[in-house]
């Protein structure tokens, strides 16, 4: 695997003029043009209310755009021509089924696909092991810590070996130490596996640490203000977190974010 | 990827005395103590004031009567329990089925739910006479009355449960293109389980009340001879201790039903639901 997968190859998903207006009249997202290549790690960075979740949900197909198009050039399509990309989604909350064990939670997508029990349990156990939860297959969510629940949630998203992993502020509710650890673990899995990540966050530091590319968003109406490349090499570790390069990149992104928010006030 | 030390929570060990969690003992002992003191005071008051048994029998007299009349009272208890459990079973099945129907379409719920409410707010004493006239078989009539009373909490609770599923989980099921049936079986029904069981626990007591109230309405003309019939009969014959003995059996039956349903609830939910967690303090 090249570091972090191939960038700039065939685009996995292309957004053109995507807009979302809610029934209440809120223009949550306007004029988004965005291409996401295979193996990319893209962060959507912006203040709360700038339409990050809305944009991510549109990519996931959970909400339809009011205007514009989202194309999946290389994904299979169903009989009606609707794209059926292999998606993994991680919410801000772990969103586990409390009545099911870690194994059953991680196996859910396979169960819904109709995969036979023995196979789905083997694959779910493998996914749990990959997120560091080997030995916790029989545990119920209630018995797990917040960080471990989020790991189960990630295992569930990875179990179908998705093309793209969509994450909506997945670590925002965790303490910083756990968050750093999960950041590292996520990068490690991403490098091993080479799927694509779209990562929503409101943390400059998190976006710089993780991503190859950052789309800085502004609110009212929600839009992508600018895109910033993060040229630092992978694997990134604690040494990167304390490097001058990291500090300089954070400063650049902070300034861009500040400008994006300012722009809103000026308008 | 490995878990860091200290990331996994360690469960606290529970101290047990005679198989019951140490903390739970006061919850068992205190009500028993209050009950024993009250019975003692009652016994003393009756003896000290020489109150005749046809006004207020003492607990010891009631107990003696219960033992003496056990053959006939136990038959009546059995009749009442049969009606109660049959009504509860039908209420559970019908409540669950109707709640599932409601969950399929907002229109069905909008159209039918008000009638379920009408059924609920109409006093059972007011409709019991009609049902007893219309339905030939008295036991079946009593069962219907008990069912009417027991039905609503199960329906309304389960409906609430089916609708209060985590929205993100619903989205997740959509994301994986789950069918309606899959969403019902693997998401909505398990999520509604605690609500259904809470409804069942309420309905257990109500079914017993319904069965007894309806039998009171049926009067001594009724041929069902459950516990309410025994109370009416004893009342006419001024056998007050026997009335109390029948009343005592009704209380015991009610408590037993409540405890049994609580146990079912606990066993079904203990692994995952907050309501079944050990309470602190
Ligand atoms: N389901 C919805 N209906 C109406 N308005 C919504 C809905 N979801 C989000 N919004 C509005 O759209 C805007 C963007 O929201 P969101 O995408 O959640 O932003 P973010 O994730 O960046 O915090 C906000 O003003 C929010 O109030
Ligand atoms: Mg959001």
Image: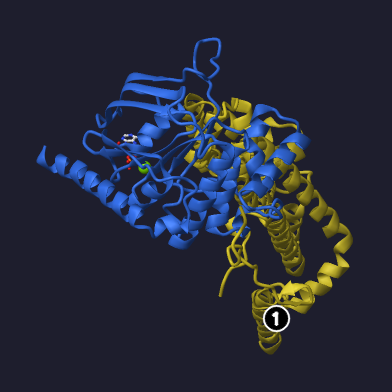
Graded by Cα atoms within 10 Å as few (under 14), some (14 to 19) or many (20 or more), the crowding at tag 1 reads: few
Of residue B251 and residue A189, the one placed in the foreground of this image is A189
Query: Is A188 rendered above or below residue B255?
Result: above
Q: Residue at x 47, y 45 (%)?
A: A234
Q: Residue furthest bottom?
A: B48
Chain A visual colour:
blue
**Which residue has dot 1 on it?**
B36
Q: Residue furthest left?
A: A266
Query: Is A187 rendered above or below residue A16?
Result: below
Q: Residue at x 39, y 51 (%)?
A: A206
Indicate how the structure is coloured in the image.
Answer: by chain
The quadrant in which the C terminus of chain B is found is bottom right
Of residue A2 and residue B20, the one placed in the foreground of this image is A2
Q: Tell me if A216 is positioned left or right of B52 in this view.
A: left
Q: Is the residue marked 1 within 8 Å of ligand 1, measured from its CB?
A: no
The answer to whether one can see residue B149 in this image is no
The quarter of the picture where residue B262 lies is bottom right
Q: Tell me if A71 is positioned left or right of A163 in this view.
A: left
Query: Is B108 rendered above or below residue B187?
Result: above
Give the chain of mark 1: B
Q: Tell me if A85 is positioned left or right of B61 in this view.
A: left
Question: How far across and how far down the image is residue B68, in percent?
Answer: 87, 68
The quarter of the picture where residue B244 lies is bottom right
Question: How far across and how far down the image is residue A231, in percent?
Answer: 37, 42
Question: How far across and how far down the image is residue B130, in percent?
Answer: 62, 35
Of residue A132 and residue B258, the one placed in the foreground of this image is A132
Q: Splitting the image into four quadrants, where does ligand 2 fall?
A: top left
The answer to whether one can see residue B107 in this image is yes
Question: How far across and how far down the image is residue B46, in percent?
Answer: 68, 83
Of residue A212 and residue A152, the one placed in the foreground of this image is A212
Q: Secondary structure at mark 1?
A: helix
Q: Which chain is yellow?
A: B
């Amino acid at each position: 695997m090249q570091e972090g997968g191939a960038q700039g190859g065939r685009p996995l998903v292309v957004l053109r003029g995507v807009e979302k207006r809610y029934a209440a009249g809120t223009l949550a997202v306007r004029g988004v043009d965005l291409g996401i290549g295979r193996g990319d790690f893209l962060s959507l960075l912006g203040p709360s209310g700038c339409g990050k979740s809305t944009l991510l949900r549109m990519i996931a197909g959970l909400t339809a755009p009011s205007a514009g198009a989202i194309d999946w050039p290389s994904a299979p399509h169903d009989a009606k021509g609707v794209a059926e990309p292999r998606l993994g989604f991680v919410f801000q909350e772990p969103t586990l089924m409390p009545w099911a064990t870690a194994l059953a939670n991680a196996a859910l997508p396979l169960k819904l696909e109709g995969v036979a029990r023995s196979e789905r349990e083997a694959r779910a156990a493998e996914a749990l092991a990959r997120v560091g939860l080997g030995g916790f297959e029989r545990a119920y969510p209630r018995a797990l810590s917040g960080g471990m629940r989020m790991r189960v949630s990630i295992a569930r998203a990875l179990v179908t070996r998705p093309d793209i992993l969509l994450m909506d502020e997945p670590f925002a509710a965790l303490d910083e130490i756990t968050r750093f650890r999960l950041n590292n673990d996520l990068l490690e899995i991403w490098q091993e596996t080479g799927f694509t990540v779209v990562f929503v966050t409101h943390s400059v530091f998190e976006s710089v640490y993780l991503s190859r590319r950052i789309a800085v968003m502004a609110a009212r109406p929600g839009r992508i203000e600018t895109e910033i490349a993060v040229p630092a090499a992978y694997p990134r570790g604690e040494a990167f977190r304390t490097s001058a390069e990291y500090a300089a990149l954070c400063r650049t992104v902070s300034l861009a974010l500040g400008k994006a928010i300012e722009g809103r006030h000026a308008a | 990827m490995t878990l860091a030390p200290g990331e996994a929570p360690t469960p606290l060990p529970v101290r047990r005395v005679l198989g019951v969690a140490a903390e739970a003992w006061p919850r068992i002992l205190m009500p028993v103590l209050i009950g024993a003191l009250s019975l003692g005071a009652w016994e003393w008051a009756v003896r000290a004031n020489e109150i005749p048994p046809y006004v207020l029998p003492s607990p010891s007299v009631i107990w003696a009567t219960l033992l003496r009349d056990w053959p006939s009272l136990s038959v009546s208890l059995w009749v009442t329990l049969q009606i109660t459990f049959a009504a509860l079973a039908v209420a559970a099945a019908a409540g669950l089925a109707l709640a599932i129907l409601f969950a399929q379409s907002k229109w069905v719920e909008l159209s039918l739910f008000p009638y379920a409410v009408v059924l609920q707010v109409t006093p059972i004493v007011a409709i019991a006479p009609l049902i007893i006239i219309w339905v030939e078989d008295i036991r079946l009539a009593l069962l219907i009355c008990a069912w009417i009373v027991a039905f609503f909490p199960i329906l309304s609770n389960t409906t609430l449960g089916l609708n209060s599923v985590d929205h993100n989980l619903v989205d997740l099921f959509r994301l994986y293109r789950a069918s309606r049936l899959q969403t019902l079986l693997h998401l909505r029904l398990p999520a509604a389980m605690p609500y259904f069981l809470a409804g069942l626990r309420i309905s257990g007591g109500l079914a017993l009340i319904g069965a007894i109230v309806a039998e009171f309405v049926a009067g001594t003309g009724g041929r069902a001879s459950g516990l309410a019939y025994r109370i009416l009969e004893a009342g006419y014959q001024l056998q007050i201790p026997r009335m109390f003995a029948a009343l005592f059996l009704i209380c015991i039956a009610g408590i037993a039903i409540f405890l049994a349903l609580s146990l079912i609830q606990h066993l079904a939910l203990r692994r995952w639901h907050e309501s079944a967690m050990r309470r602190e303090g």
